[in-house]
Image: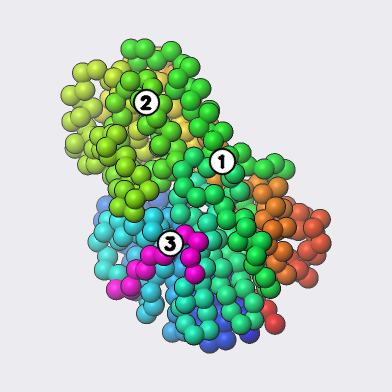
Amino acid sequence: MIEIMPIGGFREVGKNCTAVRIDDEVIVLDMGLHLQHYIDYTGDDDDADLSLNKLIEIKAVPDISLMEDWIPMTKAICISHAHLDHVGAVPFLAQKFKCPIHGTPYTMEVLKAIIADKEIRVHNRLMSHDINSMFKVSNNIKIEFISITHSVVHAALVVIHTKYGSIVYANDFKLDNQPTLGHKSNIGRMHELKNVKAMIIDSLYAHKPIKTPSESVARELLREVMISTNSKGKAMVISTFSSHLARIKSILEFSKQLNRKVVFLGRSLDKYVMAGEKCGVVEFSKQAKIIKYRHQVQKFLKDCKRPEDYVFVVTGHQGEPKSVLARMIFQNYFKFKKDDIVIFSCQIIPGEANIRNREAMESELRKKKVRIFTDIHVSGHGAREDQRDLINTIEPELLLPSHSEVATAEKFIELAEEMGYKENKRCFLLKNGHRFRIE
């Protein structure tokens, strides 16, 4: 008997968490934050109550009380990749489980850094497994981490192998044939999977009738802006996701062509870059200066006599009020001059606060007559045609859309029906707490 229970991330974007029960054993897939709820609550309050009950109350972490009777049966927590909406709740939730936490090398290094940041003791064993590897979690269950491309390295399609068949967890993914860093998606291994009872699948962009462009496309967009724009004598500031090591790699390469030194500013960049170095994915600290703490960032920028000699890589592309970029703009950490260049190598994550904060940021930059380049980016999430390709590759018996709000999930259901997966027969839109049994 197999039961699947969404704990978070179904009919919402964030706090991804799914529990899968096989007879009397349970595997938990991901433990993520709902970033907007978490940020809205913590704000500028460094002493905010971060107790588990409070975080569940504000809907910042998955409500594991939904699976209270399953917790003693849990044999493993498996994290698919290193983004906070998949791994960020581990420090708050893991204490309730007496089992190891498994992930790929980069994912586990990021998790260790998050735990250290939160200063929370996590007693669970942290177990790192190579990408494209398989391991036993009990006599009856094996877990496989199959390489799948996303906007972070070492992302895994997680497969739970049981005597009844397999459950595939594809949350998040894209099918990038030209990644600029890390492994390609292991399509060959996916084709080999047999008797897949159900696939939990990222449906965030089911409404977009495209295949999501490769990271190599984002690299060329970035090249065009950095190299082709006349930046002589002008400061250049680039903001992107701290975990997007492939994008940062491109920034470093083009900065070298410009004969500019690169400086990473902020704790977040330090955390993700150093995690990449610890597992041997990158060696960025040999190519760039990393300035971690706020007072050091402020001093460096104040003392910088020739900003035109640098590329400043910073956090803050979502308009976060406490980010380095926000402090540069609103707290005068940096004196922007006419025609300085600010590049947003990202897209805004939907949300009223993000949109409002970013608009304020861009408005202030325009007052300073700064040149702004936005959306120098491609997504890490597969769109409708990536979803179609993955379904055709794996051929699961059932489809369970996740990582989207209801309107987008309904677009996925349209795709599923087009492919012969009739709603409520072979494609099911679940809700958090719903126990879905597979006979």
Q: What stretch is highlighted in magenta?
A: 123-134
User: The C terminus lies in which quarter of the figure?
Assistant: bottom right
Residue under pointer 2: 255
10 Å crowding of disc 3: few (<14), some (14-19), many (20+): some
Tell me where residue 434 sits by quadrant: bottom right
Distance from label 1 to label 3 (Cα)?
21 Å
Residue under pointer 3: 130
Q: Nearer the viewer, mark 3 or mark 2?
A: 3
Q: Is residue 227 in view from this perspective?
A: yes
Tell me where residue 285 sits by quadrant: top left
**N-terminal of the two: label 1 or label 3?**
3
10 Å crowding of disc 1: few (<14), some (14-19), many (20+): some
Q: Position of residue 28 (x, y in %)?
A: 49, 72
Q: In the rendered structure, are the residues bearing label 3 and label 2 in contact, judged by CB atoms less than 8 Å apart?
A: no
Residue under pointer 1: 178
Left-right relation of 294 to 433: left
